[in-house]
Image: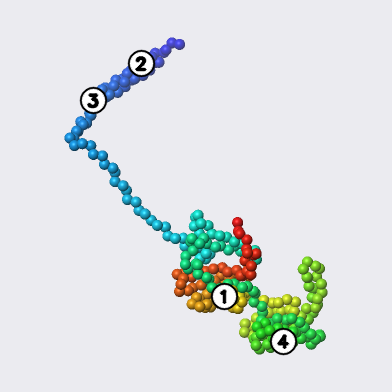
Amino acid sequence: MALTQQDKVLLGGALTLALASAGVFGWFTLRHAGPAEIPPVQLVESPYDAKAPSTPPIKAETWAAPVAQSRGREWIYDTFTPPEIFYNTRSRQFTVKPPSSLVDDDQLEVFGVELVSVKPEPFRLQLIGYSGGEGTWRGTFVNVPTGEVIVAGSGHRVAKLGLVIKSLEVAAQAVRIGESMPVRQTVATAVILDEKTRRETTITNRERVFTGTVFAFVALPGSTATREVRAGDSFLVGDATFRVEKVETSPPSIEIAKEAPTLTQPDRRTLTPRESDADAEREPGP
């Protein structure tokens, strides 16, 4: 294909521009190119003396001993000395015993008290029976603190307990026993007024009525004599002071703290009812 006059002019211009550019870059290269300067070597007459670099300072730190965990002083562990874990089938709780290598003198000290049992507090007047007839019903009551039996009707005041039998009724009621069909039973029902709190409590002869408060019985190790305690109670055993912080019924247990001159900090533990045969009731945990 033949080139037109315009194409020849454009090609010639491009060739001229390329040659001019090559010439300019070549001139700059020759202008700035020159022999490289090599610094002279300085020789000394003294022999070479090898010197080791100085050792950086090393700061040694000693880790503090592991502290008691939030669940109590027994919860102390180390990486390679795990605690011994046991499971109490009766209380349905795990018991943790720290490794002997991590137990200090305070922890080796006998705690001083044991939990015997936990019970809900019964209402101080219970209805256990009835007698009489329509319009003359009389209930058979028990003064729980003293064990005294009281036969009384509606309107009777139990001065020793600060209670008034406000009403007493006996009527047939539908009662379900276990999974069986409901059956009709005669049930005595009494409404009791507390003179101090002005609160009314309904009791029947079918079941015991409780206040909603729970209490525990504690004893010295190996002793059969018990002490009744509630949450918030404090008591002394020798020179040690014990404070009951919480009482639980499910599973039965108490949280209790001990303070003594031989302890550097309060010893807090969760106690479960003591066993008559620990080996029969405890199994190694997973």
Q: Measure the C-alpha gap from mark 4 to mark 3.
A: 128 Å
Mark closer to the observer (2, 3): 3
* Image mark for residue 35: 3
Residue at the spot 25% in from the left edge and 25% down from the top edge = 33
Q: Are marks 1 and 2 in contact (CB under 8 Å)?
A: no
Q: Along the polypeptide, which appears first: circle 1 or circle 2?
A: 2
Local secondary structure at mark 3? loop
Q: Along the polypeptide, which appears first: circle 2 or circle 4?
A: 2
Q: Say which amino acid is labelled 3.
A: Pro
**x, y (%) of residue 19?**
32, 18
Q: Tell me, yes or no, if residue 13 can be seen here.
A: no
Q: Say which amino acid is labelled 4.
A: Ile
User: Front-most of 132 and 278?
Assistant: 278
Q: Measure the C-alpha gap from mark 2 to mark 3.
A: 39 Å
* Image mark for residue 220: 1
Q: Measure the C-alpha gap from mark 1 to mark 3.
A: 102 Å
**x, y (%) of residue 124?**
66, 81
Question: What residue does disc 4 label?
Answer: 150
Question: What residue does disc 2 label?
Answer: 12
